[in-house]
Amino acid sequence: MNPMPFKNRSNTGADLILAERLIQLGARPPIVSQLCQLTRKQSIAFFKTVQGQSPKQGMLPHDHQWAIRSALNNIHASLFLGMIEGIRDRLPTPNLSANLLVVAYEIYINVASRMLADRQCIQPHSSQHYPLDINRAWYLITLLSTGDLVFILCGRCHARYLGMIHPDTAFSQCPICEVWTDRSGRRRWVSAKSKNRALNKPSAR
Ligand SMILES: [Zn+2]
């Protein structure tokens, strides 16, 4: 590993350790720059050193409806943002920090790998195969901060899940009990049509 020529004297060892961990977890240079006080050029160089390849080009995840596109997405987003809220409530400064993202995402992949291993559809430690990638996780935090995503308590199963209050989208359905399973085993949101069917045939679940 080549030594990195950091020019910014304000970089602390802690910043660099967190930057390395973020990159190992799959974070892309713009996020590393923002959270670890590195210039974009430094983050790209550091990424190449840690990952042994150039970072992916293009825009960061920005689909504001990702968490409500499927029940599976909603479960993973709710799990991760629940960690963020739980940890942030205990911090003296509730700002988003590299440390908060690293700690919450590490807990998330720990829990998610067990969930997915039970279904035998993932190889542990292949972080890009988790439904929620760390770059999207970072974007979801901003949606929670702006109030576009809100936590809702299901009156039926008592799960805490994410609903959306956005200028072009309002959505609230529990990913645990307001779903149905199609023939391939995929859990799908109960639409108005299938909801009526479920009301007529309550044993369908
Ligand atoms: Zn529910």
Image (cartoon, helix red, strand yellow):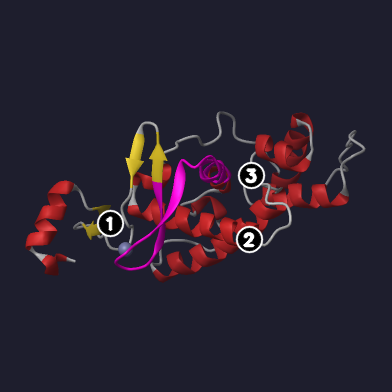
Q: Are marks 2 and 3 in contact (CB under 8 Å)?
A: no
Q: Which mark sits nearer the N-terminus, 2 or 3?
A: 3
> How much space separates mark 3 and mark 1, taking CA atoms?
29 Å
Q: Amino acid at mark 1?
A: Arg
Q: Which residue is mark 1?
A: 186
* Residue 82 disc label: none
- Crowd class of label 1 (few under 14; some 14 to 19; many from 20; radius 10 Å): few
Q: Residue at x 33, y 57 (%)?
A: 175
Residue at 63% x, 59% y: name it.
89
Q: Is residue 139 magenta?
A: yes
Name the quadrant containing residue 108: bottom right
Q: Secondary structure at mark 2?
A: helix
Label 3, on which residue?
27
The part of the chain drawn in magenta is: 138-163
Look at label 2 and name its amino acid: Ile
Q: Residue at x 76, y 42 (%)?
A: 36
* Residue 83: percent from left, percent from top: 56, 60
Q: Quick one: SS at disc 1?
A: loop
Which quadrant holds residue 29?
top right
Q: Return the disc, 3 or 1, that comes first in the chain's sequence.
A: 3
Query: Nearer the observer, disc 2 or disc 1?
Result: 2
> Is the C terminus in the top left, top right, bottom left or bottom right quadrant?
bottom left
- The quadrant of the picture showing ligand 1 is bottom left
